[in-house]
Amino acid sequence: MNNRQSGFTLIELVVVIVILAALAAIALPRYINLGTEARIASVNGVAGGLRAAVAVVQARYIANGNNAAVTVTMLDGTVVGVNAITGIPLGTAAGIGSALQAGAAATPVDGFTTSYAAPLAVTFRITPPNTANCQASYNGTTGAVTTNVTVC
C-alpha cells in the first residue's frame, strides 16, 4: 500500500499569502481614491451643465430679439426668468433652476442639494457629505459658474 498525501506545503501557502498581500498593498489605495474623484467629476459635470444652460438661454433670448423681456420660453415650454438686458438666467428657482430643471431648494436633484441665496446666487452642493467644499456655484448677476472641490 502506498499512502501518499497530497496538498500544499506550508512554504507554498506562505508564498501565496505574501503575493496576495503585496498586490493588495499596491491596488487598494488606487480604488480608495475613486470616490473622491467621482464626486469631483460630478461637481464638474454640474458646472458644465450650468454653463451650457446659461449659453442656451442667452442664445434663445438674443434670437427672440426682445431685449426688454424678463422671461424666455424654451422650445420644450420651460419658462426661464432672465435679466432684461443681458438675457442671463436669474439666480432663482424660476431662473437658472428652471433652465437646469433643478427643482425647488428643498428637493435634492441627482445627488445635489440646491440652495438659492441673495443676491441671485445659487449653490449646488453634493448631497453626501453636503459640505461647502464640494459644490458648484452660479452667480445670477454675471452668469459666472465656479466650482469648489477642495474637500470632496
Image: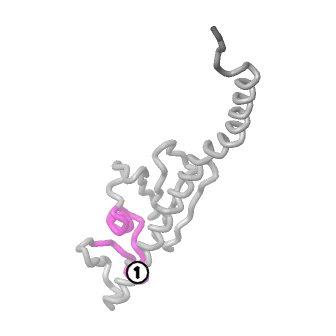
What is the magenta segment's predominant secondary structure? loop
Q: Nearer the viewer, residue 126 or 17?
A: 17
Q: Position of residue 146 (x, y in %)?
A: 56, 64
Type of residue at label 1? Gln
Residue 69 drawn above or below residue 16: below
User: Of 79 and 117, which appears nearest the observer?
Assistant: 79
Residue linked to disc 1 = 58
Span shown in magenta: 79-101
The correct choice, above or below, for 140 with respect to 31 in the image is below
Q: Is residue 92 left or right of residue 151?
A: left
* Residue 85 percent across, percent down from the top left: 41, 83
Residue at 59% across, 57% down: 148
Q: Which quadrant would the N terminus be assigned to in this image?
A: top right
Q: Residue 25, position in %: x, y?
A: 71, 37
Q: Is residue 20 magenta?
A: no
Residue depicted at x 37% and y 53%: 109
Q: Residue furthest bottom?
A: 65
Q: How many marks?
A: 1
Residue 18: quarter of image: top right
Secondary structure of the residue carrying tag 1 is: helix
Left or right? Give the position of 135 relative to 90: right
Please indicate whether residue 152 sits to the left or right of residue 82 in the image: right
Rendered position, 12 above or below 83: above
